[in-house]
Amino acid sequence: MMKISIWIILALALVNLALVVNGDDSEKTIVKTVKGKKLCKRGWECLDWSEYCCNETISDIFQPYQFENLFSNRNSPVAHAVGFWDYRSFILASTSFQHLGFCTTGGKATQMKELAAFLAHVGCKTSCGYGVATGGPLAWGLCYNKEMSPSQTYCDDFYKYTYPCTPGAEYYGRGAIPIFWNYNYGAAGEALKEDLLSHPEYIEQNATLAFKAAMWRWYTPIKKSQPSAHEAFLGKWKPTKNDTLAKRVPGFGTTMNVLYGDQVCGQGDIDAMNNFISHYLYYLDLLGLNREDAGPHEYLTCAEQVAFNPSTSSPSASS
């Protein structure tokens, strides 16, 4: 009897050790094969069957302390969104996109690079840093969650039949990669299943939704014939002959072209463009990656790229 009890105790100890090493069932990877293709679900972060859920999730490769390092001044007294942004909201937002490959594509190094690229846009667009700011100008991302002094309501009547402006609503810039204009709020609301056309203020009231809207923008091309920022960064987009003539190549530089057009690109070596690149390289450093692996100069820049959508013919995503 004593021997049986000892074996039971040893068996229970081994089970507990396995749980400590491998994690509980909430992080378990479930695998199936469909037509020879491996698909997975992974815990609560990657709930839909996907090849990308077979890889590490974002919380596997990106820890709370790293979020704090990237955005160390977001809750300082001079910031304008104190207490709004946090790691939990970012991870929760990402669960809607991880199964699509958001920071779950390729090996860990590729995943981390996309994470750094996306957050570089976030940090740059929400920064209140300047040259002599404490910690330097790159240490002040997520200082804002909305445009502070809107010059207009950003209502475009051209879209009155598809995305009509709600009386009293203002469509100024809000979010982690700020969106502007009624048509962008309308499109984002449709995709995220939120009535942002009637209530654009939801984005400045909910950090998870604010991150989701930014991820939606990262994943959504302005036109169907064009790449999303996600596709452009990872090289999932194959440039046409016209793209090559316009000096548009896969890489970080083209993410700026997708998101901001000629506000940033095709203007030569301007500060507005270099600020995004500086954030990207700085975040690579903080995440423990080698900035030399960011690629050659033509991969990083869009100084000589022709805009996908010149501002004279079509507004860019965040204009």
Image (spheres, rainbow, N blue to C red):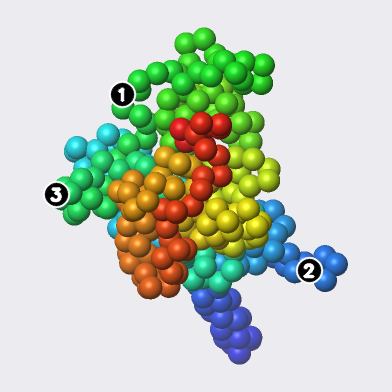
Residue 297, image quadrant: bottom left
Question: Please, what is the three-letter code of the amino acid marked with disc 3?
Answer: Val
From the viewer's perspective, is 88 left or right of 144? right
Please report the residue visible at 59 percent of the width from the left and 58 percent of the height from the top.
244
- Residue placed farthest to the front in the image? 245
Q: Amino acid at mark 1?
A: Ser
Tag on residue 149? 1
Q: Is residue 265 left or right of residue 269?
A: right
Answer few, some or many: residues within 10 Å of disc 3's Cα (few below 14, many 20 plus, some between 14 and 19).
few
If the image is split into quadrants, where does the N terminus sit?
Answer: bottom right
Mark 2 crowd level (few <14, some 14–19, many ≥20, 10 Å Cα): few
Residue 163: x and y, percent? 62, 21
Q: Nearer the viewer, residue 266 or 201?
A: 266
Q: Position of residue 230 (x, y in %)?
A: 56, 54
Q: Picture coordinates of residue 246 (x, y %)?
A: 55, 53
The residue carrying mark 3 is: 132
Question: What kind of element bears circle 2?
Answer: strand
Q: Residue at x 50, y 18 (%)?
A: 155
